[in-house]
Amino acid sequence: MTMAERDLKSEIKEKLSDDIMQGALSKFAEQYPGSRLKSYAGQDIEALREDLRCMKAEAVDEIEKLADDFEANVKARGGQVFRAATGDDVKKFLIQICKENGVKRVVKSKSMASEEIHLNECFTENDIRVKETDLGEWMIAIKGQRPSHMVMPAIHLNRYQCAEMFTQELHEEVPGEDIPYMIQKARQTLREEFLQADMGITGANFGIAENGAIGLVTNEGNARLVTTLPRIHVVLIGYEKLIPKTEDAAKILRLLPRNGTCQRMTSYMTMVDGPTKIIYKDENGKYVEGDRKQYVILLDNGRLEAAKDPVFKQVYQCVRCASCLNVCPIWTLVGGHVYGHIYSGGIGAILTGLLNGIENFHKFSDLCIGCRKCTTVCPGKIPIPDIIDELRSRYVKAHGTPSMDSSFFNMLNDRSTFHNLLLKAAFIGQAPFKTGKYIRHLPLFLAGMTKGRSLPAIASVQFRDRMDRLSRNNPSKPKKRVAYFSGCNMDFVFADTSENVVKVLQNLGMEVVYPMAQSCCGKPILGIGDREAGRKVAQKNIMAFEAVKPDVILSACPTCTETLKETYLKLFEDDAEWTRRAMDFCDKVQEFTQFVAAEYKAAGKLMPTAGGVKVTYHDSCHMKRGLGVFEEPRALINATPGLELVEMHNCDKCCGMAGSFGMKYAEVSLPMLEEKVKNIKNTGAQIAAVACPACMMQIGGGLDSQEPGVKVKHIADLLAEKL
C-alpha cells in the first residue's frame, strides 16, 4: 500500500486501542531514561557525543574518498565490492550471485538497509528460501510484519503474541509463560537454517575505510553464525556507515550500546576483515574446503545526494541506535508501524523523505511535534526537528502551501480583520457554551474538541485594547524601555496574564510599550514550511518594533521567543540588509522569566522563601530545550512568598499541545495530557505553574476537566498576585 492510499488517522486509532502495545511501549519509555543514564555512570556524555558528531561530520565531507579507500581495502583482502545506486540494483546483483553460485537458502542477521529495499520479498519471488535469524526479526517475519523499532523490532509484542508466532512456525503448541523454552526452540530451529544456508547476509554498524573491515554489534550471536557458516557472505552497508579509521569505531562503540540497549557493551562485537577458508558440502554431498566468497554492497539509494546537502548531510551522524524513538512521546503512543516507509520516529521521517521521496515524508511529517527531546539523547547530536522543518519547507516550495492553512494564517496575520471582525464574532458565538473562563461542552460534531479537556474562552477584552490604560502606570524615570510581544494566545485568550506581565515589569521600574502593528510571530506558517510567508511576517514585526526603539523586546511565550530570537535570523541569510536588521532585533529579544529573574537577582529579590501553597512546574518544550531556560522559573517560584515548589515526575515531557497538533491529532494529544494531569495530581500541588500559553491552554483545560481542584497559572500570574 502506498502512502497516498493509507488512512493515517485510522491506523493511529487502531494503535491507540492496542492495549498490549501501549503497555509494552509505555513501560519501556518509563524505564529507558534512567537505565541509559546508569549505563553512562562515570562518563562525560556530552564529550562523547561531541566526539562522535565531529568524526561523523568530517567523514561525510569526504565520503567519496572514504568509499574509494574502503573498496580498495576490501578488494585487497579478497572481497568483492558492488556499488548499488538503488535498491533494485542490489536485488538484481544478489539474484545474479545466487544463480551463479547455486544459492537456494539464505540466512540474514538484522539489517535495516535490507528492510529499506524489501530484499526478503525479492528472494521469495525468485524461489530462494530466506530466513531472518535475529529473534525479533524472525518472529515478526512469520506474521509478515515489519520492524516497529530499529534495535528492538518486536518491542510492540508481548510473550503470548510471540508464542503464537512460534506455534505458527513450528506447528506445535508453544506456551507463552515459558520464555526460556521459546528461546531454546528458536535456537534449535535456527541452527538448522545456519547449517543449511548457502549465503549469509549481514548489515554493518560501521565500515572502516583504512582497512576494509566491518563491525557488527549484536546481543544474540546470530551475526557471527551468519558470517562464518555459509560459504558466501554478503555485507549490505549504506554509505553513512563508513568511517575513516579503526580508532573511530571506539567513538561509536562508546555510545551505540548505551543509547540503544542501555548496555556499556553488547554481548558480541564482531569485526570481519575479509573472506576466510570454509568447509562445506558440495553438490555431491561431500565436505570440501574452499575459499569463502565475500561481497560488500555499498548502498546509495539517495544517500550520496544527501551527503552533498548542507542540511541533510547531518543524517550521516545517525548510528541507528533508535534512542530518538525511545524518548519520542508520539512513537511511545502510536508505535513504529504508522510511520512512512521502514524507518520510524523523527529520524524515520527524515530518512523516508531522503530515501523514498518528499511526498512520502509529507504524509506523516506532523507526527513530529518538535518537542526536541530526541536532540538531548542523539549520540550524533542530529537536530532532527530542524531537518524536518527543512523538509517541510522544500515540500511547500515544490507543492505550495495548503490553501486552508494559508487562508487561516492570512486572517490571523491581518490583525485588523481578525481582531475587529472574527474575534468579536467568536466571542459572541461562544456565549452559550462558556462557563467562567472555559468552554466545557460543544455540540454535535464539535463535541470531540472538549473530550477530556475544556477549551479556554476568548477574552472579553483583548490585551491590545487594555494597553492604553496600562501604559498610564509606566514609571516616569524607567530603567529600561521594554517592548512587549504578546503573540496570539496572550493577546486574545490569556489577556489577563499579559496584563500581569506588564504589571510585573512596571513594578521593576520598566516602561512597557506595545507596538500595535505587531502580528503573529509566524510560527504556525513556518511550521507548515512556508518560509516566504514567514519572512513577510518577520519583516512586519521587525519594522513594528524598530519604530518604538526599545532596549528590550520581551515575550511571555517561549514559542514566540524562540521564533523571534532564533528563527528570524535564519530567514534572511541571503539578504544582507535584512540580516542586519534581524540581528539587531534578535539581540534584544528575551523570555519573560529569564529577564525578570535577572532583574530580581540584581535587586536582591531572588532569595528562596519558606513554605506555603504547593506549586508544581511544567517545563514547556520550547522553553527548556529550545531556549535552555528552566532554572529561572523555579527560582522565581521559590522566591515568591507563600509558595512552595514541588517537582512533578517527567516535568519536561510534552503536554501534547504542540500548536495545532493538539487539535489535529486530539486522539494522540489527550493521552499525553492525561499523563501530565496524573503527574500533577500526584504531587499534591494546588497550582500547576507554566511559562507557556499553549501549555497553559492544554494543561489548564485538562485540569478543569479532570482535576478541577488544581489551577493552572502562568509565572507572571504568580508574581503579579504578590505585588
Image (tube, rainbow, N blue to C red):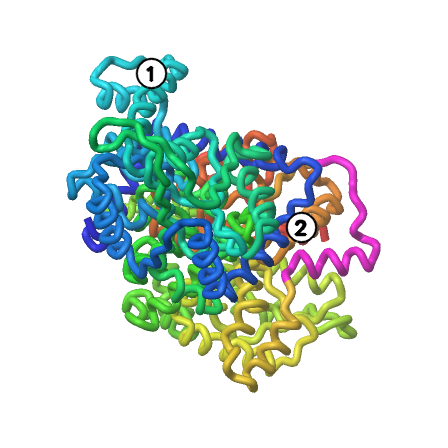
Identify which residue, 212 or 719, lies in the foreground. Answer: 212
Side (left or right) of 96 relative to 188: left
Q: Residue at x 35, y 28 (%)?
A: 157
Residue 21 can be seen, yes or no: no
Magenta stretch bounds: 591-612
Asked whether residue 569 is in view, the answer is yes
Looking at the rendered structure, the secondary structure element under dot 1 is: loop
- When asked about the image quadrant of residue 277, the answer is top left
Give the percent coordinates (x, y) of residue 499: 60, 61
- The circle drawn on residue 123 is none
Query: Which mark, by number, is residue 47?
Result: 2
Mark 1: which amino acid?
Gly
Tell me residue 31's x, y (percent).
53, 31
Question: What's the amino acid at mark 2?
Answer: Ala
Q: Nearer the viewer, residue 228 or 627?
A: 228
Mark 2 or mark 1, earlier in chain: 2
Q: Nearer the viewer, residue 92 or 259?
A: 92
Report which residue position mark 1 lands on. Answer: 176
**Residue sitting nearer the eye, 224 or 47:** 224
CA distance separating discs 2 and 1: 43 Å
**x, y (%) of residue 377?**
56, 46
Q: Quadrant of residue 285?
A: top left
SS under mark 2: helix
Residues packed near mark 2 inside 10 Å, few (<14), some (14 to 19) or many (20 plus)? few
- 593 falls in the magenta region: yes
